[in-house]
Image: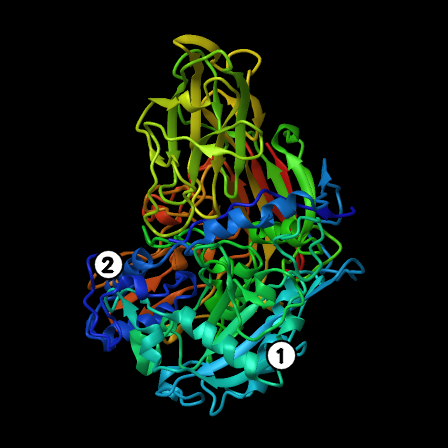
Amino acid sequence: MRKKQLFSSLLALSLGFSSLGLTSGAAYADTKVQTMSGSGFDSGVANEERLIKMLQKEGILSKTASRAEAEKAVQQFLKHKQEQSNKYIRNKGAFDKKYNKVTTKKNAQNAQNKYTKGKGKKLGHAKNLPSVVPEVYSGEKRTDKVLLLAIDFPDYKNSTITKEESDMFYEDYPMSHFQDMVFSKDGYKGPNGETLVSMQQYYNNQSGGSYALDGEVHGWYTAKHEAAYYGGNYPDADGNDQRPKELVKEALEAAAKDPNVNLEEYDQWDRYDLDGDGVLNEKDGIVDHVMIIHASPGEDAGGGRLGTDAIWSHRWSLDFDEQGEPYTIPNTKSGQDRFGGELAVIDYTIQPEDGAAGVFSHEFGHDLGLPDEYDTIYSGKGEPVSFWSIMSSGSWAGKIPGTEPSGFDPYMKEMLQDFHGGNWQTGSEVDIKDVTSVPQEFLLDEATTKGTNNDAVKVTLPDKVTNIVTPKSGSKLYHSGSDNDLETTLSTSVDLTAAKSAEFTFDAWYDIEKGYDYAYVQASTDGEKWTNLEGNITNNDDPDNSGSNMGNGIDGKSDGFVEAKFNLDQFAGQKVQLRVLYKTDSGFIAPGLYLDNLKVTADGKVVLEDGAETIPKFELNGFSVSDGKKYSKNYYLLQWRSHNKIDGGLAHIKRGDGFLTYNPGLIVEYVDESFSDNHVGKHPGEGYVGVVDADQNALVWDGESPGPASTQWQMRDAAFSLTKQDPLKITLDETSTLVDKSLVANALFDDSKDYSNKAQPHAGKILPKHGLKVKVVGESKDKTTAKIIVYK
């Protein structure tokens, strides 16, 4: 069977406790919040074991606390940091308006995404499956230049980490260490002399040989201020980093003065197609990938002796000025005519000097356009992805936490295939309507080896229907669309040459992200210059200085239909064009704007009326006729996971003084595009992506504070397989013991069964009922291939 590429639409996610009262030494937490540069926050890289120790050291958590109490304390700590994080980039809206910015999703829509449809072929024998046969990839390959800069602090110099502070302790952290850890094709030397996987190896493996990294590490440079100036938390010690962006700028400016650094060579990719020529493989005046390494452990791994004053690893963007111009590195030359001829920097990632390939690769995944898969607001006890993906908890897998990150789950690989082409994921697709009682057979290769069989099998389902709004009258109304990075319009022309007064009215129902996404009612007499009209539902607020409100914007919630009124008297005696514009950014996806009963009256008489029931009298550019319901794609992705190569870390995930094993087998992943988050505490069993747990027997902590374990533990036995599960018995903190008493193999997924996990619903999935069954019927002796059947 010749494999073809799987694809899906991009889901961009917004990042998202009374105070814990941490006693941090954040001496720089002044009261002027507007002076703070702000920080992104990525709880997906949190090292739970190290954070427990940090909270105990700070006196927030008792050293005799049970495991359940410790997990709850970490959850509250992360939740509060998330609430305090700066989710948006200052004046980013102004940049988007000024430049013809093309999103990753729009680029993906132009990619050639193909896959094999139809029935699976009956290959192999269930009892004697051959091992995986690696495939030689001869297709297009892409290499990205990555700029790595290392910077330390006057009070925390590089290579002064102690063995007690870090699981990745070295006597010295020279540039050669980072060069090997990021760029080496042969791995790098671990703290015990072992060879560990590099970021280069990780992405080469996961991309099937179609993606590579190139670049050099430069430093050590020294910051202007002490470490707490940048990493000290605001507005309180359990808040968020104050000024990491200042540290990024200082590192860039130091590199610009370094005669050994040629910054211009790190601009190769016009990812936003700023010149609008459709060519992305060209310079645009923006450094493509910036990675900053700071001295000290990261706060996400306890922060060492800095504790909460350390910087939390994250990927974010530098702010824009009020004119929408990005930060530019002084005294540089880009060779481009934009940004004053200087090199600009927008996106960056930052991680600690003792970081391993896991955290580095997770953050770089964001730089390639991937969202987080964990519960970004910590609404529950984890989510049903966990260590199955590096974009959830998988960045910390391995005997030495973070040195053996797990691979991407099939949905993240599908996104990477969409965004970047290449060889990330290939496979077969079958539509549920073509599934019958006659089994269709498919061969799967392990996810860490690009073999001659399927990387994944996709089972498409009927669209999921969600009721949003009932039309004000009739059965139809107009809808703006609901997605990230939209710019949709509904427009018409009206002749008011004989009128002395005029008004535009309509019934509006809206739920628009407040402060960042906006709708506008606009008028123009020439079709080029548009005026944003003031109406009874507009405002000029800009609550977070995002620069998104272009004036007289409509945002927030209408709480039902409201009659919107816009005076057109200023256009009386003229022919005028009217339009409704809906514009969104990346981040949170809201339902959008619905319009019904649109009318233009002149001198009290109706001159245009449209209720969306017949042929539209408005031109629809992105707007559509709607019945008030949302139709969302949803489907399953089937992937075979092993303990080989990149997924070796799934065999030994460090937990306290012991190890947790994720059992190999078939993961059944449900993708539901009616959701844009995995906040399972708010909607248990539902989210935009989740792995179905094959074993619905919940793991429960015994001891002083018994209770269901978090999803990181529950998902260990999620894979469907013919092989009995590995045993689990682990005692943590001498107070809590976890034993898995149900080790029976489960080879059959059946959507008629209940996978909602009643005892720990945050690990469960509520699934549609279509009569779908997927069964593992064969595994090779070395577990590198499997045969599955799909049937009803």
Residue type, numbered disc 1:
Glu
Residue type, numbered disc 2:
Pro
Q: Is residue 259 above or below residue 469?
A: below
Mark 1 highlights which residue? Answer: 216
- Name the N-terminal-most of marks 1 and 2: 1
Q: Is residue 216 above or below residue 747?
A: below
Residue 285 location (% of width, % of height): 62, 63
Residue drawn at x 56%, y 41% is 636
User: Is residue 404 among what the camera can see?
Assistant: no
Mark 2 highlights which residue? Answer: 706
Residue 90 location (% of width, % of height): 41, 56
Would you identify the image quadrant in which residue 247 lies?
bottom left
Q: Secondary structure at mark 1?
A: loop
In which quadrant will I find the C terminus? top right
Residue drawn at x 20%, y 70% is 60
User: Is residue 489 among what the camera can see?
Assistant: yes
